[in-house]
Image (cartoon, rainbow, N blue to C red):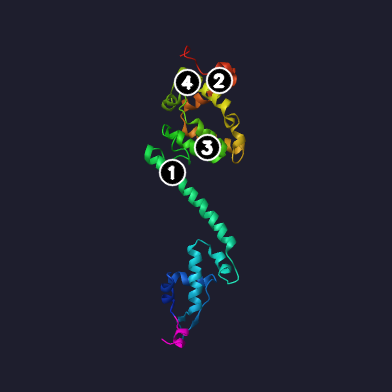
Amino acid sequence: MDASEAVGRAWSTRQLAELAGTTVKAVRYYHEVGLLEEPERAGNGYKQYRVPHLVRLLQIKRLSDLGLPLAQIAALCRADQRPDDAIRVLDAELAATIERLQRVRAELAVVLRDRAPVDVPEGFAEVAGPLSEADRAMLLIWSRVLDERAMAELRDMMQTRSDGDDEFDALPPDADDATVEALAVRLARVIAQARERYVSVRDPGAFGLRGAEEARRTVLPAMAHLYNPAQLRTLARAEQIRAQSAPEDLAPPTEEDR
């Protein structure tokens, strides 16, 4: 092939697509959005793509492979434009994605190692093993109404199984008043200790992602649905006992008390 033949070389749409490592559909779409100019047509009506079309298509594919959106590629393909800002934004997005994927892998490692539940918010797999199905569901809802600090305090609280947790999970819907009262007294102590240590327990509304009222409108119906009547009575009574008791009355029991 001499120089004149090389300069006059033309490709069909399919040939161009194969040469660039893309598809005929992609080439046609680039025409539609204005990224790739339509070539001249031969006498038989077929498109005739030449070297500038190939170069342009290769540029589009390269930038697209890097993750740049097509909306930015039109300007970035011009010789007088440098894609520095767009590349920096893309790099930051990729870094955030990598960090997220690393966290996900760490969570999956915990799930596989400890057979931990997967239906809990990020960061809770390691501490959520003993939770009931209702508690796990409630935890997901808390993650949508509380901010990061409150969720971090909740995760810290869950490091230790509280007194009465197992009994609360097993409480039947028709539990008698004496059973509810005894358990409520124990849980009142737990609530008092948590309020003393964690600011988000004292004022959860202050840590609501969308305000205290929105948190209340989400959490109360969820609790009413997820917990049985005896459990709800126990929680209400425990908070009542906590509010009406002096701090010294809710101190952890001593060995003598036990």
Q: Amino acid at mark 2?
A: Ile
x, y percent for residue 10: 45, 82
Question: Which residue appears at 43% of the width and 46% of the height?
Answer: 105
Question: Circle 1 sits on which residue?
Answer: 106
- Find the distance from the CA under tag 2 to the CA under tag 4: 11 Å
Q: Work out how far the residue at label 3 is from the one at label 2, CA to CA, in angstroms.
A: 24 Å
Choose the circle earlier in sequence order: 3 or 4.
Answer: 3
- Element class at badge 4: helix
Residue at position x 46%, y 80% from top? Answer: 47
Q: Give the structural element (helix, strand or loop) at label 2.
A: helix
Q: Is residue 236 magenta?
A: no
Residue pointed to by mark 4: 183
Pointer 3: what residue?
A: 142
Please report whichever mark, 1 or 4, sits nearer to the chain's N-terminal start: 1
Q: Nearer the viewer, residue 121 or 86?
A: 86
Q: Residue furthest front?
A: 3
Q: At x 41% / y 76%, what residue is drawn?
A: 15
**Residue type pointed to by label 4:** Leu
Q: Which residue is mark 2?
A: 241
Per the image, label 1 sits on a secondary structure element best described as helix
